[in-house]
Amino acid sequence: VIERSFRVFDKEDEKEVEKEVNNETMKKKKDKRSKIIRAVSIKKIISKRHIQSGLNETVLMRITQTLYSADHTKASNDLGTEPAAVHTGLGGTVDTVVGALKNPTTSPTTILAALVKKRCPSYNFLVNFQRGEMRLQVLVRKGALEKEIKDVESNAVNTGIGSVLANKGGIVTSFTLRKTRFSFLSAHLEAHEGEAHFLGRCSDLADIFSKSRCGPGTMYDASITSHHMFVCGDLNFRVNLGGKWDAEKSYLHKSNVKKLTDDKDWDTLNEKDELRRALEQGHCLAGFNTLPCMFPPTFKVERKKGIVYQEKRSPSYTDRILWKSAHGLGGNVVPLAYEPVLSFSTSDHKPVRGAFSITPNAPPDRLLCGRRRCSTRDSIRTMRNSMFYRDVHFMMSNMKITGLRFKGQTPDTYILLVTDPPEVLKQEKQNNGVKILAGTAIRTMQTESEHESTKYRTWKGWPRSSTIENTNHPDWEGEAIKCAIQNLPEDDPDQVAKKISGAMLYITIMNDGITSADTVIGTVAVNLEKILSENFMQGTGVFEPILRDGKSKGMFECSINVVWMSRRGLC
C-alpha cells in the first residue's frame, strides 16, 4: 500500500517520508509500527509540500483513503474511506478538505462527518457504516423521531477480486420505525461492458442479499423481511444497443449511444438499459421498481459542471435508485423526485438523488368480526362482551408450486409458515415441566371414501405442510394448514391493533434434507395485517413469485380463509 502511494511523489518526497516514518517509529516499539503511523507521516508531507502547488485534491484524498483503510476496517458504525467530498453531493468543500489534510490527525472519515453535520444541523447519524471503499449513511431528524427508531442492524459484503477486496460489494442497514421495517442497500457492482460483466453484476447482487442478512431471524434476506427496501449506488449497468459486445467495434457503439444522448432520446436509452432488462427477465432485484431516467446518462463524465462525456466509455445510467414494498403496501410509497446533480464536478459520475413519501404502518382500520366488517376496537369489545372468547383462525388450502428451481436439483418440498413478530403463530408451552414449542398446523386429507384429519408435526414450533418428494411442481391437493393467531390481548382493543399492525406471514418453501439440514428454497412474504383486516370468508387467492436473494425461484399459489372462532366453533 505504501509503495503504491509513493508513485505520485518525487524522489525527494520519498526520502522525507522515510525520514518522517523513521522518526515516528523511533518513539515506539518495533512491533507497534503500523500503516497508521506511515499515513500520518505522509499526510504531513502532502499538506506541507503539495496543497499550495495545486495537486488534485481528489488524488490526495485517494492516497489518504488507501493509507487509512487499515484504520477503519474494524467495523460497523464507522464512516468510510472513499473521497469525502466526491459522492455526497456537498459542494464548496475544497477549503474544508485542504484544511483537514493539513491537520495530521484528521482522516477523510472525520472530514465527511464534519461536512454532513455542518450542512444538516437538524439531523443526527443513525447509521455511519464503512467497509473498505464503500460507505452507507442514514440520517434522522433530531428530536422525538429519533427515539421511535429501534432494531438498527447493519452488515456488509465484499464482491471485489476473490470476494475479498472491498472496492466492490454492498452495505445493508435495517431499522424499525412506527411498526415499519425499513432497509437500505448501497452497492458498488462489477464494472465494464459485455454480457459476462452484466451477469457478474446480477451475481454480485445475489451474493450481497445472501450474505448480508438483516432483520428478524437469519432465514431471510432484507428484501423479504422489510416492509420497504431501497437499493442505490453505482450499480454499473450499461446501455446496450443490442448484439454481442465486441471490444474492437466499441467505438461504433459509443458513437451511437452518444448520438441518442445528444438527441435527448431518453425513451430509447431507457429501453436499451441493462437494468431494465435485468428486472424484466428476473436476473436480479425481483419485485423492485425504478423510475425511468428521463435525463442524460450519468457516466462517464469529465470532472466539471454540466455533462461532458469521456471518450473511452459509452454513456450509461450506472447510478440508480430502486425500491420494493411488501405485499399490500405498494401504495404507501410515492416517488416525488428522481434526478441527477449536474453541477457536481468532483467525480466521473453525476450523482442521482431521489425523494419519496412513505406512509408507515398504522393499526388496521378493520378486522373481520363474525360475518360482518367492524372497526378493530368494536371487534375486540364484541369478543370481550361475548360469553366465549373468540380467536382468529386462518386456513391455507389449494397450495401448489409451478416451475420450482433449486440448485439444479429436483427437491423434496414442504411449506413452512413463519410470522414476524414470531409470537403471532409460535408459542411456548409447558408439558410436564418440559418447555416445548407448540405449532397449530392441521393436515386434512379428503378422499371419496374417507375423511382424515391429522395434526402434522411442526418445524421448530412453526406450522408446516407434508413433504412432496422429487418434483418441481408440487401440489398439496386436498391438504390444508389451519392456524390460530396466538396471544391476542383479550380486553385491550388498542393492544390488539398494535400487535397485528405490520405483522407479516412468510410462506417459506423448504427442501427436506433427508441426510442433511433442511434449506430454504425461497419465500413468499404476505401482509398478515391485510389478510386479517379484509373479508376472506369466500377465500382470497395468492399468486406470487417465490423469492430468494432477489431472484425468482418459481410461482406459488394458494387460497386463504379467515374466520373468528369461539369455544363453540364458528362465530
Image (tube, helix red, strand yellow):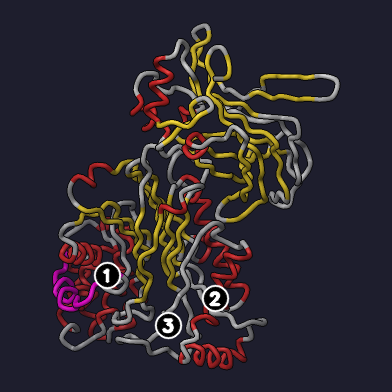
Of tags 3 and 1, which is closer to the observer?
Answer: 3
Which residue is labeled 1 in the image? 84
Does the magenta segment cover residue 99? yes
Magenta segment, which residues? 88-106
Of tags 1 and 2, which is closer to the observer?
Answer: 2
Position in image of residue 541 (x %, y %): 63, 42
| Mark 2: amino acid | Asp
- Residue at the (47%, 53%) spot, across then down: 330
Q: Are marks 1 and 2 in contact (CB under 8 Å)?
A: no
| Mark 1: amino acid | Ala
**Residue 273 numbered mark, or none:** 2
Position in image of residue 8 (x %, y %): 31, 83
Which residue is labeled 3 in the image? 296
Position in image of residue 318 (x %, y %): 46, 74
| Mark 3: amino acid | Pro
Where is the N terminus found, in terms of image quarters? bottom left
Position in image of residue 41 (x %, y %): 20, 70
**N-terminal-most mark, 3 or 1:** 1
